[in-house]
Image: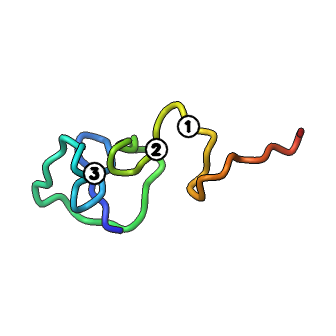
Amino acid sequence: MLLFIQHNKIHQYPVARRCSAVYQQEPLRDTVPHEVLQCPYCMRVWPENEHVVASGRPRLHANH
């Protein structure tokens, strides 16, 4: 997956249908830096589901 950063938010290239970002020749990359926000539409990361990892399974905590 190719990604680009616009206004300190990372988006997928090509942009997801529901995303309002428009690709304007920003450098494409294949990694997600820690210091940027993730677009919920492009990266499929919803604020209410932050506990769910990329595999779609809830994260298991060591204290359970």
Quick one: label 1, few (<14), some, or many (20+) residues within 10 Å?
few
Q: Nearer the viewer, residue 27 or 20?
A: 20
The quadrant where residue 1 appears: bottom left
What's under tag 1, amino acid-wise?
Asn
Q: Residue at x 89, y 39 (%)?
A: 63
Q: CA distance from mark 2 to mark 3?
A: 16 Å
The quadrant where residue 49 appears: top right
The image shows residue 27 at horizontal and vertical percentages of 22, 63
Q: Residue at x 37, y 68 (%)?
A: 30
48 relative to 16 in the view: left or right: right
The image shows residue 46 at horizontal and vertical percentages of 46, 38
**Circle 2: element type:** loop
10 relative to 49 in the view: left or right: left
Q: CA distance from mark 1 to mark 3?
A: 22 Å
The image shows residue 4 at horizontal and vertical percentages of 27, 57
47 relative to 5 in the view: left or right: right
Q: Which of the two discs, 2 and 3, sits closer to the camera? A: 2
The quadrant where residue 14 appears: bottom left
9 relative to 31 in the view: left or right: left
Quick one: label 2, few (<14), some, or many (20+) residues within 10 Å?
some
Query: Which of the image's four quarters has the C terminus?
Result: top right
Q: Residue at x 61, y 51 (%)?
A: 53
Asked if the residue under mark 2 is in contact with the one under mark 1, i.e. CB atoms within 8 Å, the reply is yes
Q: CA distance from mark 1 to mark 2?
A: 7 Å
The image shows residue 60 at horizontal and vertical percentages of 78, 47
Name the mark on residue 5: 3
> Circle 2 sits on which residue?
45
What's under tag 2, amino acid-wise?
Val
> Circle 1 sits on which residue?
49
**Circle 1: element type:** helix
Of all residues, the one furthest to the top in this rendering is 48
Task: Tell which circle, 2 or 3, labels the residue nearer the N-terminal end.
Answer: 3
